[in-house]
């Protein structure tokens, strides 16, 4: 489809595309939703989550701030989200977590968004020094006791603000650690370390400090997932699909517009971005989704993301830094996630995006000895054409 299609009349909306857009397919994506965590999202629970400090899959080797610094403003980025995405193949990817970091300064994103995101893949095989291998069925049946002794190692110091490696200690008390001078200043001035340095805090004070420190990060929410078209809302989608089928059979112009909302659009001569229309149809079925995870089977064909507009598509997805193999689309982060991050939406320079697309090594190549392998990110904004509708 070419750029000139953007200006096409909505009546030209391809009916096949329209019904495809609301049809479930063989490899239904996993939709991620934000929920208040019921238990602490510690690394040993292999969490998928937004915000908070990173839960490090590899507890012995964690990222240094050099790998999470914004290239525009030189401030440390913070964790946007991490997804636990284990794979059956290869063995190295039995445990697998993808981390997405971003600069929380919205102005930076407007300047050059490519400089303010970082994505890393981390993996561990089933047999690893840190976590006991989960029992497989046979072992469970035979009640075989798993003999596992975790490796003894010195736990790396973490920055009390952002959770990446804490390579600097407070010069006075030597008991809190920071990734950078910037986060040391934040703690000193905004999180009251100035007052509490070298003092013993009571429980209440301790909690207050924790809260202040957490407020420097995106809110921590658990991301739970279920396949699109199933679960609670599955029936709803079925009904919507039936409705679409009926309507498209009768009058494509009206139905295409009706699906967008309940208002009547008298003037159908509006320029509409077909990708945006499709996007809205899909998202409208499950409006609370924040993630669309598309690589649900190891050997499934490569998938196209759900674009929010025809323009701003990546021309080339660079090969894997590590193995040189292809990177393919894995998941997308929707703008709905912004509602859960506890950031200001009113400020002119607040964080914003239409969708963020994560591309990762198709073969989940071994990461050793690097622990973290960079992956590729793309961003689309909502187009002006789409928003006009
Ligand atoms: Zn920045
Ligand atoms: Zn930090
Ligand atoms: Zn101190
Ligand atoms: Zn690779």
Image: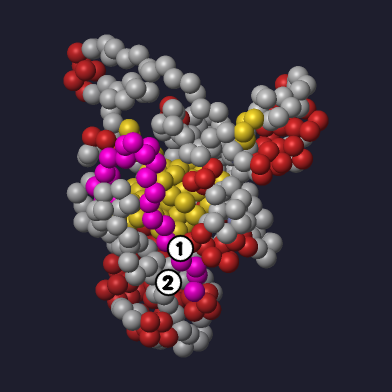
Give whichever of discs 1 and 2 has the lower sequence position: 2
Q: Residue at x 30, y 23 (%)?
A: 133
Name the residue tied to disc 2. Answer: 312
Determine crowd level at label 1: few under 14, some 14-19, many 20+ residues with C-alpha closer than 10 A: many
Residue 358 in the image, given as x and y percentages of width and height = 39, 55
Residue 381 in the image, given as x and y percentages of width and height = 50, 68
Q: Is residue 314 left or right of residue 381?
A: left
Magenta stretch encompasses residue 366: yes
Q: Residue at x 44, y 44 (%)?
A: 99
| Chief SS of the magenta region | loop
Compared with 135, 186 (above or below) is below
Magenta stretch encompasses residue 255: no
CB under 8 Å between discs 1 and 2: yes
Quadrant of the image for the N terminus? bottom left
Mark 1 CB within 8 Å of ligand 1 = no
Q: Quadrant of residue 310?
A: bottom left
Q: Residue at x 53, y 52 (%)?
A: 102
Which range of residues does the magenta coloring cover? Answer: 361-383
Q: Is residue 32 visible?
A: no
Residue 379: mark in rendering: 1
Q: Quadrant of residue 248?
A: bottom left
């Amino acid at each position: 489809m070419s750029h000139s299609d953007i200006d096409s009349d909505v009546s030209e909306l391809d009916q096949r595309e329209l019904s495809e857009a609301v049809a479930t397919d063989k490899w239904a994506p996993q939709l991620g939703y934000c929920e208040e965590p019921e238990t602490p999202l510690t690394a040993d629970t292999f969490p998928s989550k937004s915000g908070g400090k990173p839960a490090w899959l590899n507890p012995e080797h964690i990222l240094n701030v050099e790998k999470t610094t914004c290239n525009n403003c030189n401030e440390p980025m913070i964790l946007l989200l991490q997804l636990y995405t284990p794979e059956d193949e290869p063995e190295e990817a039995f445990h697998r977590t993808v981390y997405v970091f971003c600069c929380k300064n919205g102005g930076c994103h407007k300047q050059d968004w490519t400089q303010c995101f970082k994505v890393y893949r981390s993996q561990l095989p089933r047999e690893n020094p840190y976590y006991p291998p989960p029992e497989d069925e046979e072992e469970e049946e035979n009640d075989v006791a798993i003999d596992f002794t975790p490796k003894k190692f010195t736990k790396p110091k973490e920055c009390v603000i952002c959770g990446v490696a804490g390579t600097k200690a407070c010069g006075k008390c030597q008991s809190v650690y920071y990734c950078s001078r910037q986060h040391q200043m934040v703690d000193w001035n905004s999180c009251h370390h100035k007052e509490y340095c070298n003092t013993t805090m009571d429980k209440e004070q301790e909690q207050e400090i924790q809260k202040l420190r957490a407020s420097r990060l995106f809110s921590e929410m658990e991301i739970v997932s279920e396949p699109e078209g199933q679960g609670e809302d599955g029936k709803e989608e079925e009904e919507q699909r039936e409705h679409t089928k009926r309507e498209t059979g009768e009058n494509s112009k009206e139905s295409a517009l009706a699906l967008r909302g309940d208002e009547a659009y008298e003037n159908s001569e509006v320029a509409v971005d077909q990708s945006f229309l499709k996007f809205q149809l899909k998202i409208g079925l499950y409006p609370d989704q924040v993630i669309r995870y598309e690589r649900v089977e190891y050997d499934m064909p490569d998938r196209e993301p759900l674009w929010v507009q025809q323009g701003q598509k990546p021309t080339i997805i660079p090969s894997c830094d590590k193995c040189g193999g292809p990177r393919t689309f894995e998941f997308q982060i929707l703008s709905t996630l912004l509602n859960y991050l506890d950031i200001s939406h009113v400020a002119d320079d607040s964080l914003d995006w239409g969708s963020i697309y994560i591309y990762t090594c198709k073969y989940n190549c071994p990461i050793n000895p690097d622990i973290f392998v960079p992956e590729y990110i793309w961003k689309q904004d909502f187009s002006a054409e789409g928003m006009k509708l």
